[in-house]
Image (spheres, rainbow, N blue to C red):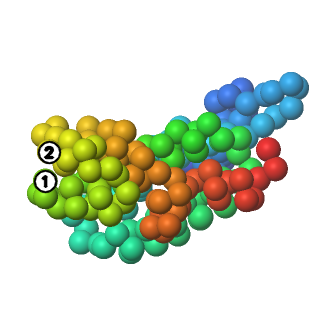
Amino acid sequence: MWQIDGVKETCVEHISRVKYLGYSFYKYRGKCRFRVHPKSIAKMKDKIRELTNRSNGWGNEYRALKLTQFIRGWVNYFGMADMKKLLRDTDEWLRHKIRTIYCKQWKKAKTKFKELKKFGVEEGKARICANMRNGSWYCGSYFVLQTAFNNKKLRELGYPTFTEFYLKICEN
């Protein structure tokens, strides 16, 4: 193994301990396969937290645009990796974050009720959801918000999904 200024240039390691350009490797049925390294996953989640931060002063349209740009670039870079389950889980987490953002933006119960009615929620369920006193993260997982902000509605609002981009470019 060569080291120049503390950086490993070449090393001989077991395949499961190698990280190269954000990928890690594993053997499956005698073949070497790619997966996204856990450090790369952590960086991706940190970036999503940054992009969905409510204190950055962005509107929902601009936030959706920035998320689309990030997701497209990330999936294109890591497109060779096996990551369907990772992307499904990340999409679920991202949808929850987006629902929470909208719930937090509608500060008053009256506004929540009015906006939920716009999204097609029946009056009784909208009233219950609008008057909930739980935190916004809890309300983001409430079934009324999940049905109001389903995948189709979020796509209409401009929010992308990792899985959608991945399935366009991958053959796995």
| Circle 2: residue type | Asn
Residue 157 on image: x %, y %: 45, 67
Residue at 38 percent of width and 57 percent of height? 120
Classify the position of the C terminus by image quarter: top right
Dot 1: few (<14), some (14–19), or many (≥20) neighbours within 10 Å? some
Asked if the residue at tag 2 contacts the one at tag 1, i.e. Cβ–Cβ closer than 8 Å, the answer is yes
The one nearer the camera, 101 or 162, is 101
What secondary structure is marked by label 1? helix
Residue at 88 percent of width and 26 percent of height? 30
Q: Is residue 38 left or right of residue 31?
A: left
Q: Is residue 108 visible?
A: yes
Residue 66 on image: x %, y %: 44, 70
The one nearer the camera, 165 or 109, is 109
What secondary structure is marked by label 2? loop
Q: Which residue is mark 2?
A: 131
Q: Which residue is mark 1?
A: 109
Classify the position of the N terminus by image quarter: top right
Toward which corner of the image does residue 34 lie, by quadrant? top right
Residue at 42 percent of width and 47 percent of height? 147
Question: Furthest residue to the right?
Answer: 30
**Image vertical order of residue 83 relative to residue 50, above or below:** above
Residue 14 on image: x %, y %: 71, 26
Q: Which mark is residue 137?
A: none
Residue at 53 percent of width and 57 percent of height? 152
**Image vertical order of residue 70 relative to residue 17, above or below:** below
Toward which corner of the image does residue 143 lie, by quadrant? top left
The one nearer the camera, 82 or 158, is 158
Q: Is residue 66 left or right of residue 74?
A: left
Residue 27 on image: x %, y %: 78, 28
Dot 2: few (<14), some (14–19), or many (≥20) neighbours within 10 Å? few
